[in-house]
């Protein structure tokens, strides 16, 4: 047992990383045979590819953090349009910043070594080392209020998915908005859920419009939760890509628990990738390991899971570039959702087929 047991542990030699001219995919494949978080980043690509190879699999992304201000928005748009993800759950701030850019405003390189009181006087908002123009945010807020006043009905229980799809549809007519997250999701048929919609200028612009115009536009968050849970209930299999933590992470994970309650059988997520900078020892959800979530029934005990502890602004460019190079992405048959059904119907067919 001694020598046999030793050989069992020492089966896979670590391969030194050599310098050279590699594509992003080639580099990550080599990194998967090194160590530490470089290895985990390489393994994350492998699991994400496996999600896209699996037939009749729905890939759900949970996205938090200031990804659009940091310059990651077009990476997310690529994932939507190429159907490397099938459902997006994100913060309202993600879409607020995306709308800000879609309407022609820009984010600017700044510094965290700055007098923030001076920025306040000039109506400049700061996200670490990135600046935004508060005057242009007000333009976006007024655009949302005007759109809602023209488009949405009083006392109808809208879900965040319906709100986001409506904004995306409106942006289809806006020059320069083609690569926005909102428009890309709408045109690719990817549902977007924003469980904390009011925690953003996109949400509070609707509230402000209600107050100023004496309207009663209603966003029904319970119906919202019901929609995404029913989606997981009818999906043959689900997988998860988590970027950051917070509400989007738990919203995606809890769908497996709710679905299990409702259908009376295991409906756990089967593959998972997590990119995070949060640590588990503080006991918070953002740092919670995927393995801990197994105890809640969010992931199957045999699920293939990998967590990479890295800044998403470093990890995402590598992962998305590698997926863009991968020929298997174009061969995938993604799910198409029919929301006029109760519950939602899922069909697996190529877009525009």
Image: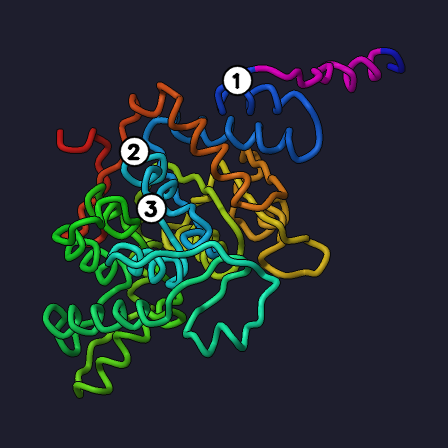
| Callout 3 secondary element | strand
| Callout 1 secondary element | loop
Residue positioned 53% across, 55% down in the render: 245
* Real-space CA distance between mark 1 and mark 3, rounded to the nearest whole angstrom: 31 Å
Q: Would you place residue 315 above or below residue 62 in this image?
A: above
* Real-space CA distance between mark 2 and mark 1, rounded to the nearest whole angstrom: 23 Å
Q: Position of residue 98 (x, y in %)?
A: 33, 56
Question: In the rendered structure, which disc, 2 or 3, sits on the residue that comes first in sequence?
Answer: 2
Residue contact between numbered discs 2 and 3, judged by CB atoms under 8 Å: no
Residue contact between numbered discs 1 and 3, judged by CB atoms under 8 Å: no
Instruction: Magenta stretch: give its range.
Output: 4-20
- Left/right placement of residue 83 relative to residue 292 reads left
**Does the magenta run of residues contain 320?**
no
Q: Which residue is mark 2?
A: 82
Q: Which quarter of the rendered picture does the N terminus lie within?
A: top right
How packed mark 2 is, by other alpha carbons closer than 10 Å (few <14, some 14-19, many 20 or more), is some
How packed mark 1 is, by other alpha carbons closer than 10 Å (few <14, some 14-19, many 20 or more), is few
Q: Which residue is mark 3?
A: 87
How packed mark 3 is, by other alpha carbons closer than 10 Å (few <14, some 14-19, many 20 or more), is many
Q: Which mark is residue 265?
A: none
State which quadrant residue 123 falls in: bottom left
State which quadrant residue 208 falls in: bottom left
- Left/right placement of residue 294 relative to residue 353 reads right
Residue positioned 47% across, 54% down in the render: 109
Between 30 and 352, the residue placed more toward the observer is 30
Between 152 and 320, the residue placed more toward the observer is 320
Q: Which residue is mark 1?
A: 22
Between 51 and 42, the residue placed more toward the observer is 42
| Callout 2 secondary element | loop
């Amino acid at each position: 047992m001694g020598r046999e047991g030793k050989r069992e542990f020492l089966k896979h030699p670590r391969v030194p990383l050599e310098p050279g001219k590699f594509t992003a995919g080639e580099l990550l494949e080599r990194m998967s045979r090194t160590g530490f978080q470089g290895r985990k980043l390489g393994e994350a690509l492998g699991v994400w590819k496996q999600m896209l190879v699996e037939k009749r699999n729905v890939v759900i992304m949970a996205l938090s953090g200031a990804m659009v201000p940091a310059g990651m928005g077009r990476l997310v748009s690529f994932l939507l349009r190429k159907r490397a993800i099938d459902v997006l759950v994100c913060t309202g701030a993600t879409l607020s910043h995306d709308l800000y850019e879609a309407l022609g405003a820009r984010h600017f390189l700044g510094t965290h070594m700055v007098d923030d009181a001076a920025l306040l006087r000039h109506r400049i908002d700061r996200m670490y080392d990135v600046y935004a123009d508060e005057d242009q945010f007000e333009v976006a807020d007024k655009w949302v209020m005007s759109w809602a006043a023209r488009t949405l009905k009083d006392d109808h229980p809208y879900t965040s998915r319906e709100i986001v799809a409506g904004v995306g549809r409106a942006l289809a007519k806006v020059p320069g908005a083609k690569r926005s997250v909102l428009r890309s999701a709408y045109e690719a048929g990817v549902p977007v859920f924003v469980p904390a919609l009011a925690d953003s200028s996109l949400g509070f612009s609707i509230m402000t419009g209600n107050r100023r115009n004496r309207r009663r536009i209603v966003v029904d968050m319970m119906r919202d939760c019901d929609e995404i849970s029913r989606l997981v209930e009818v999906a043959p299999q689900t997988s998860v890509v988590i970027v950051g933590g917070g509400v989007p992470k738990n919203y995606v994970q809890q769908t497996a628990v709710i679905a299990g309650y409702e259908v009376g059988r295991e409906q756990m997520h089967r593959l998972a990738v997590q990119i995070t900078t949060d640590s588990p020892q503080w006991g918070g959800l953002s740092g919670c390991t995927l393995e801990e979530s197994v105890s809640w029934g969010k992931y199957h005990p045999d699920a293939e899971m990998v967590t990479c502890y890295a800044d998403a602004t470093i990890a995402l460019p590598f992962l998305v570039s590698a997926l863009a190079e991968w020929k298997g992405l174009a061969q995938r048959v993604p799910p198409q959702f029919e929301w006029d059904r109760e519950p939602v119907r899922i069909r697996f067919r190529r877009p525009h087929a």
